[in-house]
Amino acid sequence: MIGIFGGVFDPIHIGHLRIAIDALEKYKLSHIRFIPCKISVDKRRKQTSINHRLAMLKLALKPYKKFILDTTEITRHTPSYMLLTLKQLQQEFPKEKLGLMIGADRVPTLHRWYKYKEILQIAELIIMPRELAVSSTKIRKNIQLDINSDYLLPNSVLKYIHQHHLYAHPNK
């Protein structure tokens, strides 16, 4: 089974990586495809540019042979609907089962996803508990307030964020 891990990843952090490592082992996944969304259908906040999010994902995933950056949603010219992504992956990998990884906190709102019943016909749900008290929102806020974010995300990603002045307070 292939793990499908979609998200904004703004930025990717150790919580994302930890649950992916656990899912890889627990579900005996052949690999996990990290699929950043280009146009999130449910985020109200302005996202960091896709080029920066892709660069951070590449840095974070580099040490893991079974973690693959998949730009399926980036190259599509529609909002990031998981159903469309799964259908495309189903065509690419017709002999593989797909395991859609979603956070336990997202399960209660799954019925609001675009054609969620079709999603459940295509992919098996892999429900992932939040293992660590870390979030992209917290990291962005920490950086904005000059609070140390060491160990909340890969060092290479944190270095990239500082290099490119991402998430910094607008008055700095």
Image (cartoon, rainbow, N blue to C red):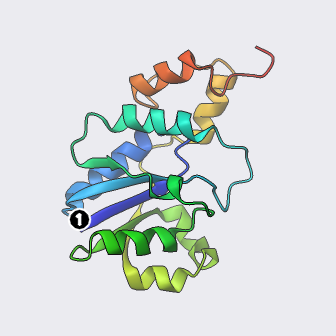
Side of 66 relative to 85 (left or right): left
Q: Residue at x 47, y 19 (%)?
A: 159
* Quadrant in the picture for the C terminus: top right
- Quarter of the figure with residue 52: top right
- Quarter of the figure with residue 78: bottom right
- In the foreground, 140 or 170: 170
* Quadrant in the picture for the N terminus: bottom left
Q: Is residue 102 above or below residue 47?
A: below
Q: Is residue 168 above or below residue 137?
A: above
Whether residue 13 can be seen here:
no
**Numbered label tally:** 1
- Where does residue 151 sit, x and y in percent of width and height? 42, 26
Query: Mark 1 falls on what kind of element?
Result: loop
- Where does residue 63 sit, x and y in percent of width and height? 26, 34
Whether residue 48 can be seen here:
yes
> Mark 1 — residue?
27
- Where does residue 11 sit, x and y in percent of width and height? 53, 37
Side of 108 relative to 15 (left or right): right
Q: Residue at x 33, y 51 (%)?
A: 20
Side of 91 relative to 10 (left or right): left
Q: Residue at x 55, y 65 (%)?
A: 106
Q: Is residue 158 above or below residue 97?
A: above
Q: Residue at x 30, y 55 (%)?
A: 32
Q: Residues within 10 Å of mark 1 (few under 14, many from 20)?
A: few
- Where does residue 23 sit, x and y in percent of width and height? 29, 58
Tell me which amino acid carries mark 1.
Answer: Tyr
- In the foreground, 97 or 49: 49
Q: Is residue 33 above or below residue 125?
A: above
